[in-house]
Amino acid sequence: MPEGPSIVILREEVAAFTGKAVERAEGNSKLDKSRLVGQTVQSFRSWGKHFLIELDDVSLRIHLLLFGSYRINERKQSSPRLSLGFANGELNFYACSVQFIEGPLDEAYEWSADVMGDAWDSRAVLKKLRARPRLLACDALLDQTLFSGSGNIIKNEVLFRTRIHPLSLIGELPAAKLRELAKEVRVYSFDFLRWKREGKLKANWLAHTKTTCPRCKIPFVKAKSLGRSKRRAFYCERCQKRHGDSEKVSVNAPVAEE
Ligand SMILES: [Zn+2]
């Protein structure tokens, strides 16, 4: 699944269509595509993993889900979910979710939660984290209401960088550690963006898909589905400290006060 930085790259790649009118709208999406024709692209925006096309009187929300993809000025063999034609080229989306958003985008999203956004507010996320003390660290990093744009790669890398065990309880992290966690999600996301542009993202992974801890030179634990989010985790039992006794929290069952 593309994480936030990949959607920022998409936004940059389609910049040539900003200010252009939609001349053709096709695809197997069920939404009323005729409504799009004649509308001008006011802006391309992103909120975490959501790619947003702001038109004259409606916006499009595109989520690439697990297997979605896009092509600019070229086509895949398969049918596009949505194909937008402009005077200067075309934009094609495949296997994704497409929805209309009515009304201003500024009202549709909590922009301070977008990890890569200009409005990112780490104090706001710290407040939300403090209100959920029984949340596991591995689940916090995948919660889009907390860290919009963070995905499984960012989760594994940030927990490794901050030496936090994925089964730590958010409420048991020392205040400075919690601040470090919130800060590092944004720092790593911009590293991700830079490395992805340079084609060096995987080469810079320290934990994600790795078998050995680069700090301790011992095997990583590879968990197939950790936490309530049930996603793959790679971590070191020695240098990633487990804060709090999450043994008592069933990682498979809902946590009581959430
Ligand atoms: Zn280690």
Image: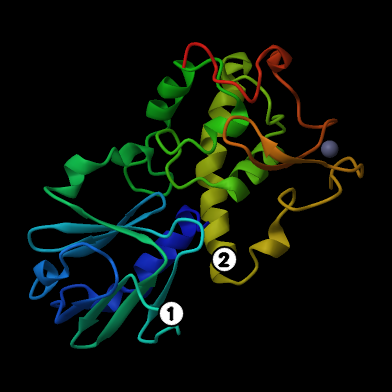
Mark seen at residue 78: 1
Q: Secondary structure at mark 1?
A: loop
Q: Is residue 31 left or right of residue 126?
A: left
Q: Quarter for ligand 1?
A: top right
Look at mark 2 in the image and give the residue it sits on: 196
Amino acid tagged 1: Ser
Q: Position of residue 116 (x, y in %)?
A: 42, 49
Q: Inspect this view and state whether residue 40 appears.
A: no
Say the numbered circle drawn on residue 32. Answer: none
Residue 240 shown left or right of residue 181 in the figure: right
Q: CA distance from mark 1 to mark 2?
A: 26 Å
- Amino acid residing under circle 2: Lys
Point 37% across, 40% down: residue: 120
Residue 178, position as x, y percentages in the image = 57, 24
Q: Residue 84 placed where, x, y %?
A: 24, 77
> Would you say 58 lies left or right of 155 here?
left
Q: Residue at x 43, y 66 (%)?
A: 9
The secondary structure type at the circle numbered 2 is helix
